[in-house]
Image (tube, rainbow, N blue to C red):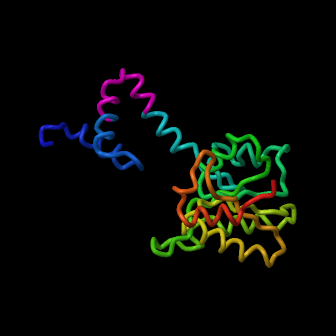
Amino acid sequence: MASTPVALRRLMESFAALPGIGRKTAQRLAFHVLDMPGDQAEGFAKAILEAKASIHNCKICQNFTDREICPICDSPDRDRSVICVVEDPKDVMAFERLQEYHGLYHVLHGLISPLDGIGPDSIKIKELLMRLQDGAVKEIIMATNPTIEGEATAMYISKLLKPMGFKVSRLAFGIPIGGELEYADNVTLNRALENRTEL
């Protein structure tokens, strides 16, 4: 590694710092960047800098946007009586791909995790509560992941909102399509049983 140029080493370390990128993949990506034509590499670097400079949180839903208010919050066609609460902007993209949900979103930018020092004040719960003061919202869908942190966050927000008269629902989780019962863990199987629907 001592024979590796410092700039290349730094590039590999930068890629390795990204989530889901191991040492070998980081090395492959770094070499790929070096093989790019100069204008393509410059465009790649410019895209990163432009995204960093222009993208921020929507002042209403906290989703990523390059405007003051994101296109979803700004759209007159969205159902303003429903807010789907998600962990991060990637989850909004997943729902939007479906083209079945027509309500609004609220992005928490994290989950409550006391072991990691993340409490309710560390994520965008206060901003959610502020949005609910105008009385337009009737239902909040908790769409956090079915992890310990996701469940804890959903329960915490639900306990805040239910006494205020809001309907709080949770995404159904269970056996995936094409999955086999014998391979399902106990929690998934139990959740599938609890969320069964009438045929």
Q: Percent x, y for residue 5?
A: 19, 37
Residue 72, image x and y in percent? 74, 45
Residue at image coords 77%, 58%: 197
Instruction: Looking at this view, name the residue that lies furthest to the front.
Output: 182
Vertical comparison of 168 with 8: above or below: below
Taking the magenta stretch, the answer to whether it contains residue 134 is no
Image coords of residue 118 (percent x, y):
51, 71
Report whether 198 appears left or right of 68: right
Q: Can you say whether 119 is above or below 171 in the image?
A: below
Q: Nearer the viewer, residue 185 or 127?
A: 185
Q: Is residue 149 left or right of residue 45?
A: right
Q: Residue furthest bottom?
A: 163
Residue at point 42%, 24% (across, down): 40
In the picture, residue 83 is in which quadrant? Answer: bottom right
Residue at 84% of width from left, 74% of height from top?
165
Which percent across, then down, holds residue 144? 62, 60
Vertical order, 68 against 173 (above or below)? above
Give the number of callouts: 0
Give the camera-side residue of 152 and 42: 152
Examine the residues drawn in magenta and state their main secondary structure: helix
Foreground of the two, 189 or 140: 189
Left/right of residue 134 with respect to residue 190 in the rendered view: right
Residue at 84% x, 50% y is 79
State which region is magenta: 30-44
Image quadrant containing the N terminus: top left
Q: Quadrant of residue 132?
A: bottom right
What residue occupies the far right of the structure in this picture? 135
Give residue 168's quadrant in the image.
bottom right
